[in-house]
Amino acid sequence: MVIFDLKHAKGSAEETAFLNDGRSILTSIPVVSNFNVFRQVSAKNDYDYGFSMEFATQEDYDTYNAHPLHTAFVDQRWLTEVERFLEIDFEKI
């Protein structure tokens, strides 16, 4: 899971494009499952958006991190359009 703020205005075409492109690009990576896009509704957290996804194994997670579609999305979109973020990686116990 990652929570983040965008440099784009809320409700803008750029915001919509980033969220939609994130969903379409990252879900096309075969090891990604249960991908969701979230908009923050709680006053207890000041991040605006979230992406979450699940992986069956640590190996799948590692494959995702190194996958060319993921690294390209990070390099071309994330680094230029995200203002700040917090990555949260959980292992089910």
Image (spheres, rainbow, N blue to C red):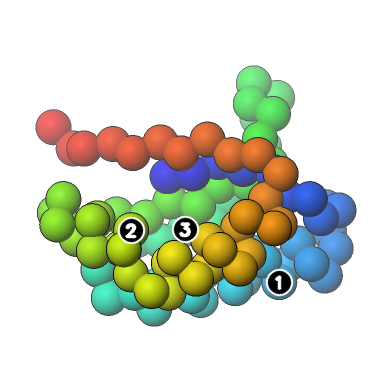
Whichever of callouts 1 and 2 sits on the residue coming sooner in the sequence is 1
Q: Secondary structure at mark 2?
A: helix
Residue at 33%, 39% in the rendered image: 89
**Observer able to see residue 40:** no
**Observer able to see residue 83:** yes
Q: How many marks?
A: 3
Q: Secondary structure at mark 1?
A: helix
Whichever of callouts 2 and 3 sits on the residue coming sooner in the sequence is 3
Q: Which residue is mark 3?
A: 36
Q: Residues within 10 Å of mark 2 (few under 14, many from 20)?
A: few
Rendering quarter of residue 69: bottom left
**Considering only vertical position in the picture, is 79 above or below 12?**
above
* Mark 1 or 3, closer to the camera: 1
What quarter of the picture does the N terminus occupy? top left
Q: Residues within 10 Å of mark 3 (few under 14, many from 20)?
A: few
Q: Which residue is mark 2?
A: 65
Q: Residues within 10 Å of mark 1 (few under 14, many from 20)?
A: few
Q: How far apart are labels 2 and 3 at the CA level?
A: 17 Å
The image position of residue 29, as x and y in percent, is: 34, 74
Residue at 62%, 55% in the rendered image: 79
* Mark 2 or 3, closer to the camera: 2
Q: Which residue is mark 1?
A: 17
The image position of residue 20, as x and y in percent, is: 62, 71
Name the one closer to the observer, 76 or 91.
Answer: 76
Three-letter code, disc 1: Ala
The image position of residue 92, as x and y in percent, is: 18, 37
Name the one closer to the observer, 32 or 64.
Answer: 64
Three-letter code, disc 2: Asn
* Mark 1 or 2, closer to the camera: 2
